[in-house]
Amino acid sequence: VANQGLSNAEGVNFDLYADGKLIKNFDLSDLEIGTRKTLSVTNLYVGKSSKNLKFIVDSTNKIDEIYENNNEADLTINY
């Protein structure tokens, strides 16, 4: 997760969804301008039949941004 904006980001949250269901919310705290954080998750159960994972930063739209369209990423799982 990177802050590519023009101001510090305070209270950054990161949500992980599996097939549309919230699995885990992570508090990333604050991100200063130009900094980034790497999140590593291990042993997080998302369900054996899950087909789609969605990662969303600032899902509550708390942070005022110039470009809001880069806060989500989707991952399709093929078994």
Image (cartoon, helix red, strand yellow):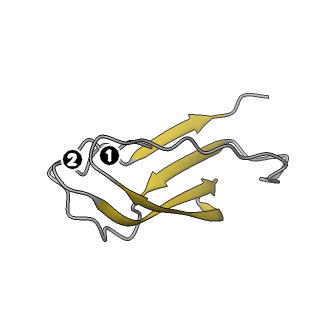
Q: Is residue 15 left or right of residue 69?
A: right
Mark 2 vs mark 1, CA separation in Å: 5 Å
Which mark is on residue 31?
Answer: none
Task: Identify the residue under disc 1.
Answer: 3
x, y percent for residue 53: 61, 45
Please name the residue shown 46% across and 53% down the image: 56
Q: For mark 2, what is the residue?
A: 5
x and y, in percent, of residue 47 in the image: 82, 52
Query: How many numbered discs?
Result: 2
Front-most of 75 and 60? 60
Q: Is residue 58 left or right of residue 64?
A: right
Neighbor class of circle 2 (other Cα within 10 Å; few <14, some 14-19, many 20+) is some
Residue farthest to the top, as pictured = 78
Looking at the rendered structure, the secondary structure element under dot 2 is loop
The secondary structure type at the circle numbered 1 is loop
Left/right placement of residue 79 relative to residue 26 reads: right
Q: Position of residue 9 (x, y in %)?
A: 31, 60
Residue type highlighted by circle 2: Gly
Looking at the image, is 54 positioned above or below residue 12? Answer: above
Please tell me which residue lies in front, 46 or 34.
Answer: 34
Image quadrant of residue 20?
A: bottom right
Question: Residues at badges 2 and 1 in contact (C-beta under 8 Å)?
Answer: yes
* Quadrant location, the C terminus: top right
Residue depicted at 26% across the width and 58% down the height: 8
On the rendered structure, is 42 left or right of 14? right
Q: Please name the residue shown 69% across and 42% down the image.
A: 51
Q: Residues within 10 Å of mark 1 (few under 14, many from 20)?
A: some
**Up-down relation of residue 10 to residue 75 (above or below):** below
| Disc 1 residue type (three-letter) | Asn
From the viewer's side, name the closer residue of 63 and 46. Answer: 63
Q: Which quadrant, please, contains the N terminus?
A: top left
